[in-house]
Image: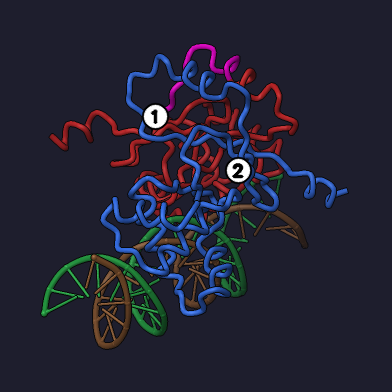
Chain colours: A red, B blue, C brown, D green
Amino acid sequence: MENQHIIDLLKKNNLKVTTQRLLVTKYILSRFDHPSADQIYHDLHDKFPTISLGTIYKTLNSLKEIGVVNELGFGEGAVRYDPNTKIHINLVCTKCNSILDYYPDQIQNSWNNLIKNLHVKPIGQRIDIYYKCKECQNRDL
Amino acid sequence: MENQHIIDLLKKNNLKVTTQRLLVTKYILSRFDHPSADQIYHDLHDKFPTISLGTIYKTLNSLKEIGVVNELGFGEGAVRYDPNTKIHINLVCTKCNSILDYYPDQIQNSWNNLIKNLHVKPIGQRIDIYYKCKECQNRDL
DNA sequence: GTAACTGCAAACGCTTTGCACTCCC
DNA sequence: GGGAGTGCAAAGCGTTTGCAGTTAC
């Protein structure tokens, strides 16, 4: 996503535009592997050595509040941040904790069909499939 | 579930049968609200005042390893334990964190249909829908 | 100018760990 | 009798908070 779009996005939501927020927002929106706060911190630290982990967390929480990212918490380890709020399936490797997005054909239709009799109004959803990724399977042989 | 079944379940998985394990296992299997370790601790403490939180955690981890419960981690708050490993939808209230199970008609068929082109072998799944429960909606009026 | 944001460090909440004691088999 | 399980307290880890200094607007 271009800088200008991110600036507009932040302004529209009454968030001041700072270098840190731009960096974090641009970074998370460009990533499809659902990084943790710590991964973001380490990756951005090269470009911007004074950024702090606290600011990463605060920014991610702001982005969560304005609906730009979803949190994916797990039983163990850190929360992962998912910039994809559309219906999709997270393929989660239970060994290395990698996460891959998966979009089956007609997923929106299938999903609508699944929840057609639901009596409540969803404000979000999460679909995970746990498996062992190729690399981890090979590593075990 | 009867005590004898739980005893068999533990023995079959090479877990020694102790009063604490019996209590925790029986308790979690009887609950449909996906309690946290702390909730379990407080509820069992009445019956068995010397049980410790550490033992609750250790037992839950053992039960997880033998596939009796699933962990539901969230961005905030404690992990919740779900004794239902069949396909179902967790209706999660984002306000009070209550969790309700939901079984749409034909959910297994819909799910099979959704993942029919998936090239990996699932070892588990999790489907959440986030919403605001009736009580929380009313409370906000 | 001022309210919001940042960086830092300390605090926090949930979970795991280490260890001496106890209990199941 | 021996190894697994328990209870306790301390440690661990990821995240939030408080606050003084800084920045966007």
Q: Residues within 10 Å of mark 2 (few under 14, many from 20)?
A: some
Q: Relative to residue A30, is residue B12 drawn left or right?
A: left
Which tag, 1 or 2, sits closer to the chain's start?
A: 2
Using the image as rendered, state which of residue D14 and residue C9 is in the foreground: D14
At 69% across and 39% down in the image, what residue appears?
B131
The part of the image, by quadrant, that contains residue A95 is top left
Left or right, B40 with respect to A42, comes to right
Residue B38 located within the stretch drawn in magenta: no
Taking the spot 36% from the left edge, 34% from the top edge, the residue there is: B123
Please give the residue where the numbered disc 1 appears in the rendered image: A100
The magenta region covers A99-110
At horizontal 41% and vertical 49% (from top left) the residue drawn is: A41
Percent coordinates x, y for residue A43 in the rendering: 36, 44
Q: Nearer the viewer, residue D10 or B22?
A: B22
Amino acid found under the numbered disc labelled 1: Leu
Identify the element where label 1 is drawn.
strand
Amino acid, disc 2:
Lys
Q: Position of residue D25 (x, y in %)?
A: 71, 44
